[in-house]
Image: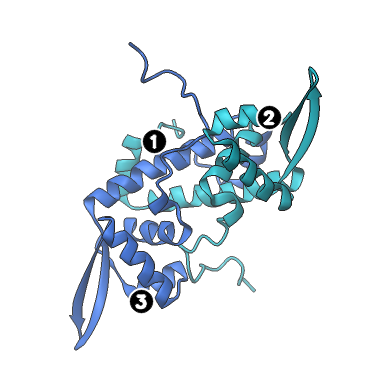
Chain colours: A cyan, B blue
Amino acid sequence: MKTKSSKPAAPFAYQGLDRVIHERARLSVLTSLMTHSSGLSFVELKRLCDLTDGNLARHLQVLEADGMVRLTKEDEAGRSQTTARITAPGRKRYLDYLAVLEQVVRDAASTNQSSHELRGKLSTRTA
Amino acid sequence: MKTKSSKPAAPFAYQGLDRVIHERARLSVLTSLMTHSSGLSFVELKRLCDLTDGNLARHLQVLEADGMVRLTKEDEAGRSQTTARITAPGRKRYLDYLAVLEQVVRDAASTNQSSHELRGKLSTRTA
């Protein structure tokens, strides 16, 4: 009865690395939106993520179609502006994804040699 | 004179997410090899990463061409077997990449709300 907690057959497969989120530009956009819960304008997102108009528009479409991001057009000083916000299901999926990233980091540090190297590289969160 | 330490213009761009490493199957292979410094056979890698023969062969070629992995054919009980090992430059690049992954995790946890959610998701490495 302990099937679920038994050692996985493929411990390094990382099936939880959701392809929609894992793509670098989308990971940038989603991390920006996670840390700005009131939303970000198209212009702010472009700057934070260093993306071109075309690239950002394309990735936002993918994220909206997938239900992770909600886009709204808002008028500001007579000009229409797009604002992006992460949705509740999007936030949940992002957190599930992050838990897998943390697993990758822990796995990589699981040998003595790499943990020694990592201590040099990573800033201390264990202090 | 503090140009280098100033706040980056695009803090969420994550340019350090090396595309060769970031692809999920290659991240699986490289993490497996980081934790097995004496190398892994093709068969062992297939199992650990849950990849098909064709997929694993293709990704190993990419990693070998990029100098991150060294492949050797070894005879065992009369049968030729491929063994993969991570190279020293490969290990260094992987660690640079990992430092960026850690940054993503820290950024995502930088708001109170998401840190609260993350504490529920991630196992404690800060204890």
Q: Would you say residue B12 is visible in this rendering? A: yes
Output the chain of dot 3: B
Q: Is residue A120 left or right of residue B114?
A: left
Residue pictured at 44% horizontal, 51% vertical:
B22
For mark 1, name the chain: A
Q: CA distance from mark 2 to mark 3?
A: 47 Å
- Per the model, the C-alpha gap separating discs 1 and 2 is 29 Å
Q: Is residue B11 left or right of residue A63?
A: left
Q: Secondary structure at mark 2?
A: strand
**Whole-percent x, y for residue B93 in the image:** 31, 46
Residue kind at label 2, given as amino acid type:
Leu
* Residue B57 in the image, given as x and y percentages of width and height: 36, 72
The N terminus of chain B lies in which quarter of the figure? top left
Q: Is residue B92 above or below residue B66?
A: above
Nearest to the eye among marks 2 and 3: give it. Answer: 2
Q: Disc 2 marks which residue?
A: A40
Which amino acid type is shown beneath numbered disc 1? Leu
| First along the sequence among labels 1 and 2 | 2
Give the farthest residue toward the bottom. Answer: B78
Secondary structure under tag 3 reads: helix
Task: Judge the density around disc 2: few (<14), some (14-19), many (≥20) Cα neighbours within 10 Å.
Answer: many
Where B72 falls versus A17 (above or below)?
Answer: below
- Mark sitting on residue B43: 3
Question: B79 and A29: which one is in front?
Answer: A29
Q: Which residue is mark 1?
A: A122
Residue B111 percent coordinates (x, y):
63, 29
